[in-house]
Amino acid sequence: MGTKEKLICLVLFIFQLMQAQSSKSEEIRFLDFTPVIDGKLDDKLLNLKKKEFNHFFQFDNPAVTPTKVNYLLGYTATHLYLYIEAKADSITYRDRGFINGDGFKLLLAKRQNDSLTDEYYDIVFSPSKDKKYWARKRIWDYNRNQNHGKKLSRETRFEEISHNGKCGFEVLLTWKDAYPYHPWFSNPLGYNLYFAKAIPNNAANGYSVVKDEGIWDEEIPKRNFMPIAFEEPKKVNQPIIVAQLFKRNIQADEPLQLNLITIAKTVLNKTIDVTIQNDSSRIFLDKKIKVSFKNKLQRESIPFDSHNLKPGHYNFLIRSASDTIAPYDFVIFPKFNFDSIRSQITRNPYHLQQGTINTLLFKTNEVQQHFNNLKSYENGKNVLKEYLQFETELNSFLKGGDPYKGIAKPYRRAFQSKYDATFQPYTIKLPQDYNPEKKYPLLVFLHGSGQDEQTVLSQARSGGNFIEIAPFARDRYNCYDSESSQNDIMEAIEDVVLHFSGDKSKIVIAGFSMGGYGALRTYYQHPELYKGVAVFAGHPDLANEWLGTGHPNFLEDQFLVPFLKTPVFVYHGKKDGALPVSVAEKLIQKLNSNGVPVIRRIIEDKTHEYPDAETNKIYFEWLTKITEK
């Protein structure tokens, strides 16, 4: 072997060694006591090894000396313990401190075949003087759902404190909030930590254990992590029993399986009570089970017959004496035949309008996809609810009725795209006194990033005299800049005008956050179609920031030419930590200098959120005025 080949082999060996070292699992210590959560490190925890953050991110911030930040982890049978310590005199309180400082993100992940995973919890913690602050402790992202909507339970505790030149951040996360990631059931696991440290001028530097673009970019399909293992208990002071259902969603006649893990100081036997009941508290099973304990972890699986349980939602309770060990819910689904359902719809024996057929076919596909995508550990309750609602609509249709006729609250419809024949959804809300003989102006409202359109119209988006629609537009992160997004918006409008009394000469385009840029972008595509544009907490150059160069920048004069004399409404919160208020101010200045009439609403105490009541009042009046012409 020559010198060159030897060198290549040496480099490969070193690389493989580094890979092996980087993938080696950290072991998390078992704690046989529950830490006090007050922001300070308990004396009992001083022997735990403090770990350093491996990566520092300065971003585009001025150069500063990195803050000394470390952390430690431990766990109990019921909780994960996390302590972060930063060398600083005080804590900075900001909106979404987990990005804007001071605050942090915790990623708990299921380890898959490689170093990346799409099964995880991304949990955020933002110090706040108001303990009820919405983003104080929250699941920000779950398995790429980005719903930003689930608060952590009261059993998860978070406190912060500054003392003696240090800032301490302490979390006790119940394993129930990160189901099924209990370390005794779900090894192998992985984690990542990202700590945002505030610096002057509303900026923040970042520190992470593992480098992962998904910390900032919600479009990243998989997340990176550090492998971890959990030390098995060597001794416990009290008997411990933990339980999980093997599957939380099954189909009719499929058996249930309960998995138990026990440990005690000495060998002993106990009896536990297992109860299955429905939401009306009707009991279908009430059984006593003997469980043995030893001075090391014992695992046992117990099957249960589900033949007498009809499709529906159930609660599975495991109790020991007066204590509830594990309250889990699960769902039994009927045995579906989606192809048969589609055939029944397309036959359309009562010749109902095509919009109804398209909507039912879309919902059939949607229920099937959601059912097929269910993980075994997910209860499937929302999918069952979705199916039961769809079943009601389907049965109405099969009897000759239009299930969507006369609905005043927001609901989801679909059209079949003429470009690729797919069924695409949009949400519609009709005026309370809707009369098909009367023409109504049309408001098109675009949703923000990481979401779909289904909740957009749950609040008033007009004064009540408009037909309101929110297209999904096949977009979660692409700023409505793609051809498919723009086509879907146009086709949603056409579908509404075809099936409802929408006045195509009186349309306004609006949007929130990413949808704010989308409103500008959509107007730019078809300025002849819209009477006005409303931008709520938007960014006029978002597509170039997120997607790279080559997209319209509405801070440049060339892209504002179509807006001449078109009314624009701009709202922004001055404390917006997601999209800075400065860009909204620049947009207003640019619009004014180009002769565009602008209503300006910059609200002092608002963050990245929908408008205050006074702004809405002014906005509704603006909508009415510009569509009366």
Image (cartoon, rainbow, N blue to C red):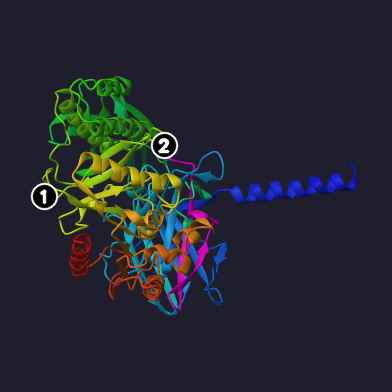
For discs 1 and 2, the disc positioned in front in the rendered view: 2
The residue that mark 2 highlights is 419
Residue 280 drawn above or below residue 311: below
Callout 2: SS: loop
**C-alpha span from label 1 to label 2:** 34 Å
Q: Residue at x 37, y 31 (%)?
A: 372
Where is residue 315 shown, x and y percent of the image? 22, 36
Does the stretch in magenta take in 377?
Answer: no
Q: Residues within 10 Å of mark 2 (few under 14, many from 20)?
A: few
Left or right side of 92 for 468:
left
Task: Assign the N terminus to one quadrant of the image.
Answer: top right
Specify whether residue 569 is in view.
yes
Camera-side residue of 174 and 457: 457
Examine the image and state in which quarter residue 491 appears. Answer: top left
Residue at the far left in the pictured view: 433
Query: How far across and down, in percent of the image, does residue 99 sit?
Result: 43, 65
The foreground one among 240 and 207 is 207
Q: Callout 1 environment at 10 Å: few (<14), some (14 to 19), or many (20+)?
A: some
User: The magenta stretch spans which residues?
Assistant: 185-214
Q: Which mark is residue 417?
A: none
In the drawing, does residue 432 fall left or right of residue 542? left
How many numbered circles are shown?
2
List x then y, in percent, for residue 52: 54, 64
> Which kind of residue does numbered mark 1 sit on?
Gln
User: Is residue 48 something one can see in this rendering?
Assistant: no
Residue at 13 percent of width and 43 percent of height: 436
The picture quadrant where one finds residue 119 is: top left
The residue shown at (31%, 71%) is 597
Tag 2: amino acid = Tyr
Q: Nearer the viewer, residue 235 or 505?
A: 505
The residue to which callout 1 is attached is 432
Q: Give the secondary structure at mark 1.
A: loop
